[in-house]
Amino acid sequence: MLYSTSIGLDVHARSISAAAFVFETGEVAQRTFGYDPDAVAAWAATLPQPAGCLYESGPTGFDLQRR
């Protein structure tokens, strides 16, 4: 599948840093969130779709894969 947007997340116990690259425009968007997966999902939904997402985390961030 081809994606319009690629999203990368760096997950920590108290925060999530996000960056997105929109292929069609070359736009880069960055946000930092408290540890609020629902806020991250809402932000990602505002980006051009379909979007692919990957993340790096320690033991505190694995519940994101279920959201």
Image (cartoon, rainbow, N blue to C red):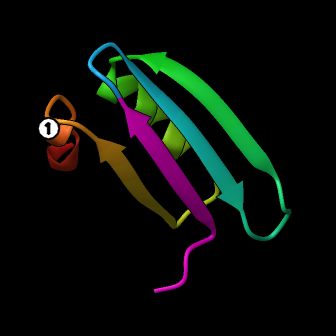
From the viewer's perspective, is residue 14 above or below residue 9? Answer: above
Snapshot quadrant of residue 61: top left
In the displayed structure image, the side of residue 43 where residue 59 appears, left or right? left
Disc 1 element:
helix
Give how far across and how far down residue 51 sits, in percent: 51, 62
Snapshot quadrant of residue 30: top right
Give how far across and how far down residue 15 sits, in percent: 40, 18
First to last magenta residue range: 1-11
From the viewer's perspective, is residue 43 above or below residue 32? Answer: below
Is residue 41 visible in the rendered structure shown here? no
From the viewer's perspective, is residue 25 above or below residue 63? Answer: below
Q: Give the residue at x 16% y 41%.
A: 62
In the displayed structure image, the side of residue 59 where residue 20 appears, left or right? right
Asked whether 32 falls inside the magenta stretch, the response is no
Give the tally of numbered discs.
Answer: 1
Q: Amino acid at mark 1?
A: Asp
Q: Give the residue at x 51% y 67%.
A: 50
Give how far across and how far down residue 53 sits, in percent: 43, 58
Q: Give the residue at x 64% y 57%.
A: 48
Magenta-colored segment: predominant secondary structure: strand
Q: Quadrant of the C terminus?
A: top left
Asked whether 7 falls inside the magenta stretch, the response is yes
Give how far across and how far down residue 49 sits, in percent: 56, 62
Q: Which residue is situated farthest in the front direction here? A: 58
Q: Give the residue at x 22% y 40%.
A: 64
Is residue 11 visible in the rendered structure shown here? yes
Q: Nearer the viewer, residue 8 or 44?
A: 8
Residue with the mark numbered 1: 63
In the displayed structure image, the side of residue 3 where residue 57 appears, left or right? left
Q: Nearer the viewer, residue 14 or 52?
A: 14
Please rate how many residues cluster around mark 1, counting C-alpha atoms within 10 Å: few if below 14, some from 14 to 19, many from 20: few
